[in-house]
Amino acid sequence: MEVAMKKITESPSHYRHLEKKSTAELLQIINSEDQKVALAVSQVLSDIESLIEVTVPKMREGGRLFYIGAGTSGRLGILDASECPPTFGVPPDWVVGLIAGGDRAIRRAVEYAEDDEQAGWKDLETHGIGDLDTVVGIAASGTTPYVVGGLRSAQQRGITTACISCNPGAPVTEVADFPIVAVVGPEVVTGSTRMKSGTAQKMILNMITTTIMIRLGRVEDHRMVDMELSNYKLWNRGVDILCDELGWPADRARRALEEKGSVRAVLESERNS
């Protein structure tokens, strides 16, 4: 059973009788509440920094970053992890997203999966987790047994743990070496943490992986020089980068990209010639 506690994420909405409001009124309400999210995240930048500063050197030695979560939180972790290979050209096991209930829970809720306190660690074990790895538990409420149990087991084994939550003093913070708690306040629809809480989590996840990848050298200047050339848009972006950097016409840039296979390879070849 979930631990009983007063949850800001479950507090009553500031707005009553939503069903009586016009579309314009509802959009204005949601937008005004969303504007609070970035301010809440700005209050935890130092906590995010602390996590990143510990994680980067471990990943340089071969460590990985794991996200564990349930429901919306789990899906956000999987989304962030899945974007790293195409954006930064890294192997898919550098950042791994795990969700309570397994892959089928990505699209449909799996009943009671998040209530299994042992399942989080079991899922981590299937990936051979070790002491160079970092585990970030994502739980808006901060009480999800799947996440709390997974972090507790990891922490007991000396593995670096962190959490992203929206409830101060939640149980998940007690098993996180690096707790990140963005207090966004009650949701417009009471308890619907896919809204402001989910937005805050997405912002923080973006910050974590983007900053880590930049620190690991996967971005040059402001460009994704290691991106996977997996569609026409990315091929065209690669060509544009080479044209800007080397002053080449598009046809020469495209031929070089076809030959070398990546923007970085072309740039390094030219700089070393």
Image: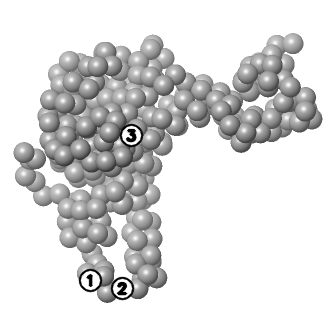
Residue matched to label 3: 77
Q: In the rendered structure, which disc, 3 or 1, sits on the residue that comes first in sequence? A: 1
In the rendered structure, which amino acid carries the disc numbered 2? Lys
Q: Is residue 67 above or below residue 111?
A: above
In the rendered structure, which amino acid carries the disc numbered 1? His
**Is residue 167 left or right of 55 when viewed as pictured?**
left
Q: Is residue 111 above or below residue 189?
A: above
Q: In the rendered structure, which disc, 2 or 3, sits on the residue that comes first in sequence? A: 2
The number of callouts visible is 3
Is residue 162 among what the camera can see?
A: no
Gap between marks 2 and 3 measured at Cα: 34 Å
CB contact under 8 Å: marks 2 and 3 = no
Residue matched to label 1: 17
* Most foreground residue, 207 or 88: 88
Q: Quadrant of the N terminus?
A: top left
Q: Residue at x 28, y 29 (%)?
A: 161
Gap between marks 3 and 1 measured at Cα: 33 Å
For label 2, the SS is loop
Residue 53 occupies quadrant: top left
Residue 230 occupies quadrant: top right
Gap between marks 1 and 2 measured at Cα: 7 Å
Q: How is the image coloured?
A: one colour
In the rendered structure, which amino acid carries the disc numbered 3? Gly
For label 3, the SS is helix
Q: Which mark is residue 38?
A: none
Can you give x and y, in whole percent of width and height, for residue 144 in the image? 19, 44
Residue matched to label 2: 21
Q: Residue at x 46, y 82 (%)?
A: 24
